[in-house]
Image (cartoon, helix red, strand yellow):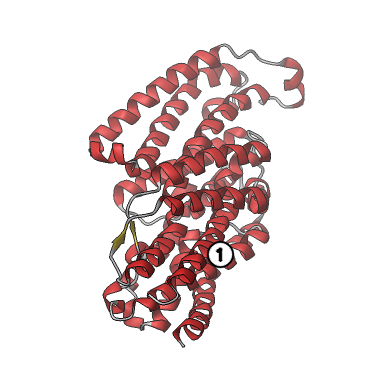
Amino acid sequence: MEYMTVYLILAAIFGLFMAWGIGANDVANAMATSVGSKALTVRNAIIVAAIFEFAGAVLAGGEVTSTIRKGIVDPSLLSGSPELLIYGMLASLLAAGIWLLVASKNGWPVSTTHTIVGAIVGFAAVGIGVDAVKWGKVGTIVMSWVASPLTAGFIAFMLFNSVQWLILRHNDPLERAKRYVPIYMFMAGFLITLVTVFKGLKHVPAVKEMDLSAGQSYAIAAVVGVIIAVIGKYFINKIKSDPEAEKEFHFVTVEKVFGVLMIITACCMAFAHGSNDVANAIGPVAAVVSTATTGVIGGKSALPFWVLVLGGAGIVIGLATFGRYVMTTVGEKITHLTPSRGFAAELAAAMTIVVASGTGMPISTTHTLVGAVLGVGLARGISAIDLSVVKKIFMSWLVTIPAGAILSIIFFFILKTIFGG
């Protein structure tokens, strides 16, 4: 194919840019509760994310990826002109990367999936035809605007209320924590294992060959949950209260217990996220590489290893360079987080992801975690939430798909003019 080398170089550059955006926005959002609650410093959050996101992306992100993300475009309509798919995917990567740059700089936690979907819909509707877009698929993705934050918010609200009712509202919170936190540890171990199996490990070839049934996955998760609860109870029982520190903050020792839990959940969520959402960047890159080298549009394309490394590296660089903006918004500006509140939000997000995996409910991980943080804030009353920040976030969600689409259309026609003659 003419210009093949140029297409491959552009795909690598734009793919790296898009992966950078995922790290700056999506990963920063995932780490925000740990940083905002002071369970992790920004530096340590970057180290945790760098290790587990990169491992998730490279070790478990290599499943054969649909060349056109989420099946929202009919590829058969492009079989006679494969170069249009290349222009479209390059335009989509560049458009999504630019929108994520703008959103991240302003501290808006937006869905990277919605960004790339909006970009692909934009070029497909204008460059190929409105009928090329499977609008039903787009509709189910848009549904996640409502479904994921509401579900996660409700679960987080109930979880944090249970923490208050069982532990924090009593005169002996540390003793109550020793009694009830192992139950939360079991839930965390059980759910995070399920998230890791469903969203991360299922992409690892050795695990994929085992073809675990749902029942086996739940059994493994239950065993891991029990082990974590038993080990956790042993260490919690050794914690002694600190009367001096508790003069300033009554729950300081109890919050330490939840802080340890948050670090564990942050590691697992980063692995699952890296294995799953890196596809938003490397899926279009794989489509360009496959089409440019073969001249044929395939429904599926195997990922070269360098593309996985590209995605993993981009995510880590994005978080390290621009992640602080979104982390500040979600972790500090929406509502004041402590380890117990942050833990309730993360556990609610994990629970929502498991429910979505089991029922096929479309969700956005970004919207899920923001909804969970709102739920925790609401458990303390509406005055505990900064509504001006929430309004800006909701507006950015509404703008994301149109912004991706408009930018993609512009870049599509520029590329078509340059390379199409």
Q: Position of residue 413 (x, y in %)?
A: 49, 83
Q: Position of residue 300 (x, y in %)?
A: 29, 61
* Residue closest to the eye, 4 or 384: 4
Q: Is residue 310 above or below residue 32?
A: below
The answer to whether residue 339 is left or right of residue 264 is right
Report the residue that reaches farthest toward the bottom. Answer: 421
Which residue lies at the image location 44% right of the left edge and 58% below the top edge?
Answer: 282
- Dividing the picture into quadrants, the one containing residue 388 is bottom right
The answer to whether residue 148 is left or right of residue 161 is left
* Residue closest to the eye, 24 or 215: 24
Three-letter amino acid code at the position of disc 1: Gly
Q: Is residue 50 above or below residue 188?
A: below
Which residue lies at the image location 57% right of the left edge and 58% below the top edge?
Answer: 21
- Dividing the picture into quadrants, the one containing residue 354 is top left
Judging from the image, what secondary structure is the residue with disc 1 in? Answer: helix
Q: Position of residue 28 (x, y in %)?
A: 59, 49
Instruction: Give the residue number, with chain letter if any, for mark 1.
Output: 97
- Which image quarter is the N terminus in? bottom left
Q: Is residue 132 above or below residue 383?
A: below
* Residue closest to the eye, 97 or 83: 83
Q: Position of residue 313 (x, y in %)?
A: 54, 49
- Dividing the picture into quadrants, the one containing residue 148 is bottom left
Which residue lies at the image location 40% right of the left edge and 35% below the top edge?
Answer: 191
The answer to whether residue 220 is left or right of residue 351 is left
